[in-house]
Amino acid sequence: MAGLSLRTVIGWRSHAVVIGAAVAMGQFSDLFLFGMRVPLLPFLMRDHLNVPEAEVQDRVAVLLASFSISSFLCAVPAGLIADIPNLRSPLYLAGLLAMTAGTIVFYTSHEYAVLIITGALNGFSIAVLYAAGWPMIVDAVAPQNIGKAMGTIRSLVSVGQLCGPPVGGLIFSRWGFQGILNVSLGVLAIDFILRLFMVDTPRPPGAMPAVMPESGSTNKTAGGIEEGTVASKDIGDANGNGHEPTETDRLLPESSSPSRPSSSAVAEQQPTSDGDNATLTGEPGIGTEGETKKKPFILPILFCLSDPQLLVAIWLSLVQFIIFGAYDATLTIQAVTEFNLTAEQVGAVYLALSLPSLVLGPMAGWAVDRFGPRRVAITGYAVYGPALALMVLPSSGLLSGVAAFSVFCVSLLVQGCCVPLAQTPSMIKSMQRVNSAVRHNPARFGSRSAFGQTFGLNTLIASLGLMIGNYTGAALREAAGYWVMNSVLAVMCASGSLLAWTVFDSGES
């Protein structure tokens, strides 16, 4: 009876809900705690570090960039380590420890160089939490719910990123730095409790179920094999329905055991060609004579970058985080200088960005599961562009007073609605394309899965976008005005919608 009780407890600790809550809390905490600093930085520079007013914008941009540079440099190594099952949990815990250290040091030391180091620690933390956390979700969640799970978690993470500034501004205006430190320690305590309660259950190497291609139409995967031919038929048979899969089908096929392909899939596993072009249509990790002649890539994710759909997914993610970076560097300063807001009022403005993401995140994930990444991405970026363009009216002087502030807030509200519609499709599409390459070219990847590398790549792109956004956003605002910055971002969103429409598979065959 005691043994049964222990197994029950372990089963609950490895349940998808528990793992999802722990991963969501880890990523939420990192961006929330870092976001709480954003509205404080101009005041910190002037009041505590005595930085001249003319240098505040540049100092803030450098401090924010330390976070992005660190996560950029750590993303790919973290992804490679996360693909080793036994190292995934220790890596995740290391990320939480780095986040705790960075948070405590930030609020107890006011030396500018030390503040940059704390930003780097938080950047390392988010790279690790993404690379190790997302594969935990993929291993734990039912295949048909992956989009919904990612949309929900991404919305919570976005809320953490966007709610950090208002909460930070509110606490700072009333209780100062000590109040923010106390709240931060409370959030970290909850994070550690969830992490220690969770039991990760990684799949053994080579046991990952095959991933469906996104469309039944014939096109090249990242590995150079045509979809819609032998490989597509094998997957359809493995699902037991015999139809060619589409973008709206389940990401991972149903099977009686996650570590065992169906009998029909095993029977039909044959190399499609010889030599260097040999590929398999069965499960990754099932070796054949043709497969074992090739050595895995040291960095196999690079093998996938010839896929145009993956490149478009990368561009969509890059655009999203360029916007985040530009707003992190400029929104607080713009609100203070244009509308003369206090730190508490600036924090309240951020609620317009954060609340819609919390509500629409699960809906965006459901839409991706139901309609596929293409439609959701087109819609999200098609609306995102005009929302950014609205910022031209108050910031260019065309409106003033209450009208200008109203349009300012409406623009932020619509942007908040677009965030989950823009983020979730690019993540799902990149995972689909990379795992399509893994399935058709298993020897290129070796015996490990590519989930850690996939999300490491996403983190790298996100970090690059934040860096570009921090610097170019601040530079455009200083040189040409806030309305020019938003006009450039709106054009980038329009390009994202157009590329999703022209390059992504429709999944409607």
Image (cartoon, rainbow, N blue to C red):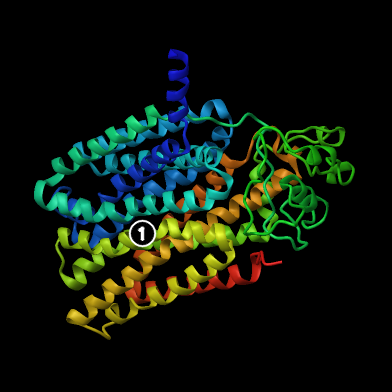
Image point (33%, 39%), residue name: 117
Q: Which is nearer the eye, 436 or 455? A: 436
The amino acid marked with disc number 1 is Val
- Seen in the image, is 267 located left or right of residue 359? right
Q: Tell me how many marks there are.
A: 1
Q: Position of residue 325 (x, y in %)?
A: 38, 58
Q: In the image as oriented, which residue stretches furthest toward the right?
A: 274
Q: Which is nearer the eye, 255 or 380? A: 255
Is residue 452 shown to the viewer in this render? yes
Q: Quadrant of the N terminus?
A: top left
Above or below, 47 against 278 in this view is: below
Q: Which is nearer the eye, 272 or 292? A: 272
Q: Position of residue 234 (x, y in %)?
A: 79, 48
Disc 1 target residue: 359
Q: In the image as oriented, which residue stretches furthest toward the bottom?
A: 398
Q: Which is nearer the eye, 461 or 13? A: 13
Give the quarter of the image for residue 481. Answer: bottom left
Image point (25%, 49%), residue name: 37
Is residue 50 shown to the viewer in this render? no
Q: Quadrant of the C terminus?
A: bottom right
- Seen in the image, is 97 located left or right of residue 260? left
Q: Position of residue 108 (x, y in %)?
A: 19, 36
- Seen in the image, is 199 located left or right of residue 84? left
Mark 1 nearby-residue class (10 Å; few <14, some 14–19, many ≥20) = some
Q: The residue tagged with tag 1: helix, strand or loop?
A: helix
Image point (36%, 59%), residue name: 359
